[in-house]
Image (tube, grey):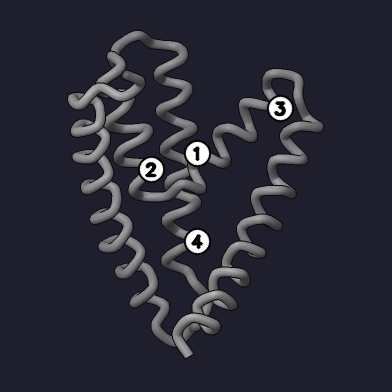
Amino acid sequence: MPFELEKVLIVGAGGFVGSAARYLLGGLVQSAAAVSTFPYGTLFVNASGCFVIGLLSQLFESQSAFGPNARAFLMVGVLGGYTTFSAFGSETVNMVRDGQPLAAGVNVGVQIVLGLLAVVLGRYVANLVWR
């Protein structure tokens, strides 16, 4: 079985923490910029999530202080609940680091274009179904 129940629960607990942090911090930042419609809260969450995943990735690679459960809780759970943009950023940087700049560029383009198209398609389908 590819997923152990213990790991699923660890990731789920981390996801709760990350999602709650995203809601609280994103809302706090957005309300501080109340005169603007620019999504400062989302920008803050994505940038801070990328910083934290970079920090933790380097720490995990250079130190062996954290075991697989801690990594699952923090990287997949907390940061996954906080922002999946951090995973996208980390994976793209890893591709460049590993000598795959073309794959990294394709990843950036495909993730952005496909993500935007999926939002448009989802809105279109919702309009068809729930008129």
- Badge 2 amino acid: Gly
At label 1, the amino acid type is Ala
Instruction: Say if 26 sits above or below 57 in the image.
Output: below
Give the vertical position of 100 relative to 9 (above or below): above
> What amino acid is labelled 4 in the image?
Leu
Q: Classify mark 2: helix, strand or loop.
A: helix
Q: Position of residue 32 (x, y in %)?
A: 36, 75
> x, y (%) of residue 30?
39, 73
The residue sitting at 22% across, 46% down in the picture is 17
The secondary structure type at the circle numbered 1 is helix
Would you name the residue on which mark 2 appears? Answer: 80
- Percent x, y of residue 80: 38, 43
Query: What residue is pinned by disc 1?
Result: 87
Q: Earlier in the sequence, mark 1 or mark 2?
A: 2
Q: Earlier in the sequence, mark 2 or mark 4?
A: 4
Q: Gap between marks 2 and 4, in whole Å?
A: 16 Å
Bin the neighbour count of mark 2 within 10 Å (Cα to Cα): few under 14, some 14-19, many 20 and up: many
Distance in Å between CA atoms under marks 3 and 4: 23 Å
Under circle 4, the secondary element is: helix
Residue at which label 4 appears: 43
Q: SS at mark 3?
A: helix
Mark 3 neighbour density, 10 Å: few (under 14) some (14–19) many (20 or more): some
Numbered badge on residue 96: 3
Farthest residue to the front: give it: 129
Q: Nearer the viewer, mark 2 or mark 3?
A: 2
